[in-house]
Image (cartoon, grey):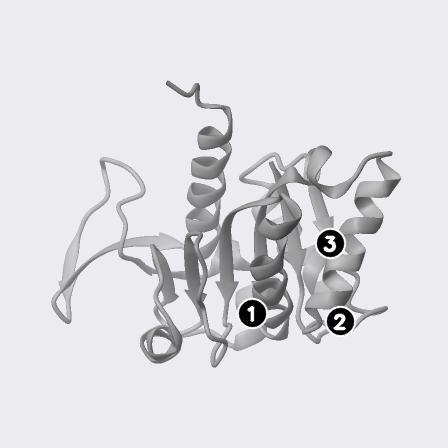
Amino acid sequence: MSVIICPGVHPPELTQDFLDGIGKLLNLKQVYVFPTRQFPAYSALHLLNFLSTQAWAQGSQLQHCTLRSLVLIGFSAGVVGAMGAAQVLPSLGVQVKALIALDGWGVPLLGNFPIHRVSHDRFTDWSSTLWGRSDASFYADPAVAHLDLWRSPQTVSGWTNQALDSASTARSSYGETQYPTTAAQFLKHLLLHYQEAEVAPTA
């Protein structure tokens, strides 16, 4: 399984900070960062071309290399490109295991694959449901600045609607059961889940 990072419109140093923040928790081996200094962050076409270029660099077509199954992580405008590419990739023989949208407010989240939201505040999390469904999600509480969610997810505390471990302490908020965690821990939980599903034996 490969992880595709789709940054937004911001200094590239923030993406490296993001990778450092989650990298301390999880050993990601197959990570590809879409170069938004060269291409528009919101362009699914450029993202697909980038992935094809990476596949050919491995001497194989897209569906026959390490990029044959993906988790896409998009931030802000990068959610647009990630969502658009995720709609096309299955027709190229690539399995989209999940899409994780960090502050993808206003982007319709629709697809035949798991979709997760990570938001910098509760309002963004709640209002994003108007644009499509979501599986497990996270929002920061207290709220943080939009860019801080990307810059340092390991310092962003908040709530998820999924228990990450058996010791999680639940609370009820607006009729929903919630569990405390950090944005980075939530991302780690998701990526480990999809990695384990990748190697699990099939019946």
Image quadrant assignment for residue 42: bottom right
Q: Which mark is residue 101?
A: none
Q: Decide: few, some or many residues near mark 3? Use Cα within 10 Å; few <14, some 14-19, many ≥20.
A: some
The residue under label 2 is: 11
Image quadrant assignment for residue 182: bottom left
Q: Decide: few, some or many residues near mark 2? Use Cα within 10 Å; few <14, some 14-19, many ≥20.
A: few
Q: Secondary structure at mark 1?
A: helix
Q: Earlier in the sequence, mark 2 or mark 3?
A: 2
Q: Decide: few, some or many residues near mark 1? Use Cα within 10 Å; few <14, some 14-19, many ≥20.
A: some
The residue under label 1 is: 148
Q: Which residue is more in the foreground, 157 or 47?
A: 47
Q: Which residue is more in the foreground, 81 or 153?
A: 81
Q: Secondary structure at mark 2?
A: loop
In the displayed structure image, the side of residue 179 where residue 40 appears, left or right: right
Q: Earlier in the sequence, mark 1 or mark 2?
A: 2
How far apart in space, not on screen, are marks 1 and 2 (Cα)?
Answer: 13 Å
Q: Which mark is residue 33?
A: 3
